[in-house]
Amino acid sequence: MSSLLGAADHALGLAFAMFWEILWALILGFVLSGVVQAVVSKGEMTRLLPDDSPRSLCIASGLGAASSSCSYAAVALARSIFRKGANFTAAMAFQFASTNLVIELGIIMAVLLGWQFTLAEFVGGPLMIVLVAVVFRVLLRRRLVEQARRQADRGVAGRMEGHAEMDMAVTEGSIWSRLRSAKGLTATSHYFVMDWASVWVDIVVGLLIAGALGAWVPERFWQGFFLVDHPLLAKLWGPLVGPLVAVVSFVCSIGNVPLAAVLWNGGISFGGVVAFIFADLIVLPVLDIYRKYYGWRMAGFLLAAFYATMVAAGLIVEFLFGGLGLIPKQRAAKVVEASVTWNYTTVLNLVFLALAAILVIRFLGTGGPAMLKMMGGPPGHAEPDP
């Protein structure tokens, strides 16, 4: 019994250590995301995404990067704009950018893994969107898209539809005046709290899984699984197996990053980490939502297309960054024992916790709890108080 308790304590210690290391970065990322969403309206998305042209894909990627990082909200909003007339490929590009090109993901990757991984994410993300567009252009038949639209129009519930439809952006005046206004502060506070509410489960589960794997799985297992004794095979194997690990882990969005840190320390290739992070949109719960939204055939097509392009993007990033000498020589992701000391991390955590408290107080005083109740259900309408 004591050994079991010791093992559990070790795993929880690692999970808490990673949480403490990334807490300030999480808050900063969600604040920046809330600010952007407060001044960028979702109302024009359908009009701006009429086709799969490079212009539409760039706009879709930009709009996605400016929205919530919640995978479920991204998938729900992609269906919403598709139902309203947006091109299907552009809607999928928006969906990918919403979870893999957002500010908070890049910050967390830089803190836990290193700046090279953040750079790889923002190089590989657009690359994967291009690959998806090419695959869709060549292989996706209009008949299948029409079937998917009919299924989408049925409005079968998935998750986070209310959050996906929420649009409180302030559109009058300059960006600076919008942010300084009472409505801008209120919108920022609502997006901040609701984004946290939508992804906290993924973050907690991701930290717990990462802590358990870091504490209980011996390093020699990871080294054998990721073929570290065969350098060339390891570079090819990592992007192939990375998304499969993500699929069965059930963790999506930012919750993937702590687990990616454990896998990197264990020996997965650089491109394998990138492919693993990309795979938040093919985890099992999200695949089930595709089935509900678009039908079995389109869900299967999305799984195959996304997996193939994730692998390809991971391989390209692996050899591109390797050729440029940008892959870290040391595997030193921050998976450490729990310890809270008076250092820069603690100072930053206290500063950003104070900022979070201000936003939460604003949220509570402007009708936020009532909106929060509707967030996970069908789309509704509610306006925050100024």
Image (cartoon, helix red, strand yellow):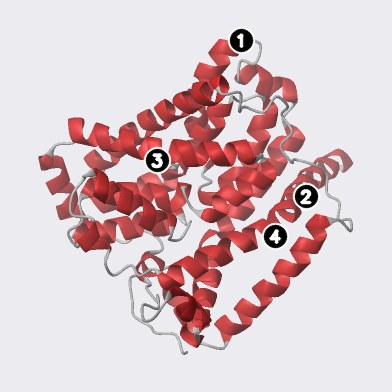
- Residue drawn 22% across and 39% down? 297
Q: Are marks 1 and 2 in contact (CB under 8 Å)?
A: no
* Callout 3 crowding tier (Cα within 10 Å): few <14, some 14–19, many ≥20: many
Percent position of residue 299, x then y: 29, 41
Q: Residue 17: which numbered mark, if any?
A: 2
Residue of label 4: 24
Using the numbered discs, state the Cα–Cα distance from disc 4 to disc 2 in whole angstroms: 13 Å
Q: Earlier in the sequence, mark 4 or mark 2?
A: 2
Mark 4 and mark 2 residues within 8 Å of each other at the beta carbon: no
Q: Where 108 sits versus 34, above or below?
A: above
Q: Secondary structure at mark 1?
A: loop
First in sequence: mark 3 or mark 2? 2
Kind of residue sitting beneath label 4 = Trp
Q: Residues within 10 Å of mark 2 (few under 14, many from 20)?
A: many
Judge left or right: residue 293 versus residue 175. Answer: left
Q: Amino acid at mark 2?
A: Ala
Of the residues tagged 1 and 4, which is closer to the observer?
Answer: 4
- Cα separation, mark 3 vs mark 4, equals 27 Å
Above or below, 177 relative to 347: below
Residue at figure coordinates x 45%, y 73% from the top left:
38
Q: Residues under labels 1 and 2: Cα distance?
A: 32 Å
Residue at x 39% of width, y 35% of height? 127
Where disc 4 sits, the SS reads helix
User: Which type of secondary structure does the marked residue at label 2 adopt?
Assistant: helix
**Label 1 CA crowd tier, 10 Å (few <14, some 14–19, many 20+):** few
Residue at 32% in and 32% down: 304
Which mark, by number, is residue 126? 3
How far apart are the two marked residues, 3 and 2, measured between alpha carbons? 32 Å
* Kind of residue indicated by mark 3: Pro
